[in-house]
Structure formats: C-alpha cells, structure tokens
Amino acid sequence: MAVMLTEKAAEQVHRMIGERGSGIGIRIIVESSECSGLSYRLTFVDQTEADDLTFESHGAQLFVSQKSMVWLEGTEIDYIELEEGSGFDIRNPNVTHACGCGESFYV
C-alpha cells in the first residue's frame, strides 16, 4: 500500500509549486506534536533525500521518509475548500484517536 494524493490535492500541489516558481513536489512529515501524540507537517521539496520514498498521484510527487512511512501507510491526502478556509485534509487509516485541538493524533 502507499500514500496518495486525490486528484484535487494533486492539482493544488501543481498550482502551489507554480506560484512558488520551483519545486518537485511536497513532503509529508510525521513528528512529535507540541500538544501530545504526533502531528503532520507538509513542506515543499526541491530535491530528494537519501531515505525518501516517492509516490506519484495524478502527476504530482509526494515524498515520505522511511521513518514517517511507519505511520502513514494507506494515507490519502485530499484538498478541501470550506467557508472557514481551505487546506489539505489527511485521511490516515492508522489513527486510533485524535486530540481535541485537531492538530495531534495517535496510532
């Protein structure tokens, strides 16, 4: 199984890289949360790193370190637009509990 972007998320990645003027994709990182548990961070990628796993969805590249992949297997990243704002929506089937703040999760 892999990590993937929906078509809408891939379109957004292409748009953001175009606006930025450089980059080859985005990276999803799992790290310790300031609140509790773990949290996600998305960053632009200009060059790959030695332990990167690379996934392509709808022509957009998504990079994940082997360390983060442990928590991300089967994850789908979508892009949503709501009245309150828009952003990437990470749907991780491994999450067993999310913190009340909405920023942290547990697997």
Image (cartoon, helix red, strand yellow):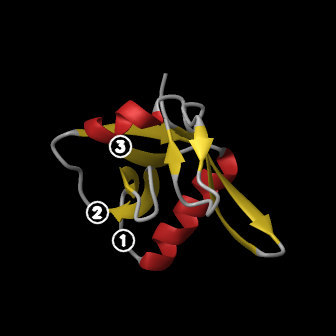
Q: Label 3 sits on what residue type?
A: Val
Disc 3: CA contacts within 10 A as few (<14), some (14-19) or many (>=20): many
Alpha carbons under labels 1 and 2: distance apart:
7 Å
The structure residue drawn at horizontal position 44% and vertical position 60%, both measured from the top left corner, is 42
First along the sequence among labels 1 and 3:
1
Q: CA distance from mark 3 to mark 2?
A: 14 Å
Q: Earlier in the sequence, mark 3 or mark 2?
A: 2
Which mark is drawn over residue 46?
2
- The residue at 62%/59% (across/down) is 102
**Residue sitting nearer the eye, 93 or 103:** 103
Report the residue marked by disc 1: 22
65 vs 10: above or below: above
Where is residue 32? Give x, y as percent: 35, 54
* Residue 3 at x, y percent in the picture: 49, 35
Does residue 45 sit above or below 74 in this rendering? below
Three-letter residue code for mark 1: Ser
Instruction: From the viewer's perspective, tell me whether residue 22 is left or right of residue 57.
Output: left
The answer to whether mark 1 and mark 2 are in CB contact below 8 A is: yes
Residue 84 position in % (x across, y down) = 78, 75
Viewer-nearest of labels 1 and 3? 3
Label annotation for residue 95: none
Q: Are marks 1 and 3 in contact (CB under 8 Å)?
A: no
Q: Three-letter amino acid code at disc 2? A: Asp
Q: Quadrant of residue 69?
A: top left
Q: Which mark is residue 64?
A: 3
Above or below: residue 1 compared with residue 14: above
User: Label 1: few (<14), some or many (≥20) within 10 Å?
Assistant: few
Element at badge 1? loop
Q: Nearer the viewer, residue 52 or 16?
A: 52
Query: Is 22 left or right of 98, judged from the image as shown?
Result: left
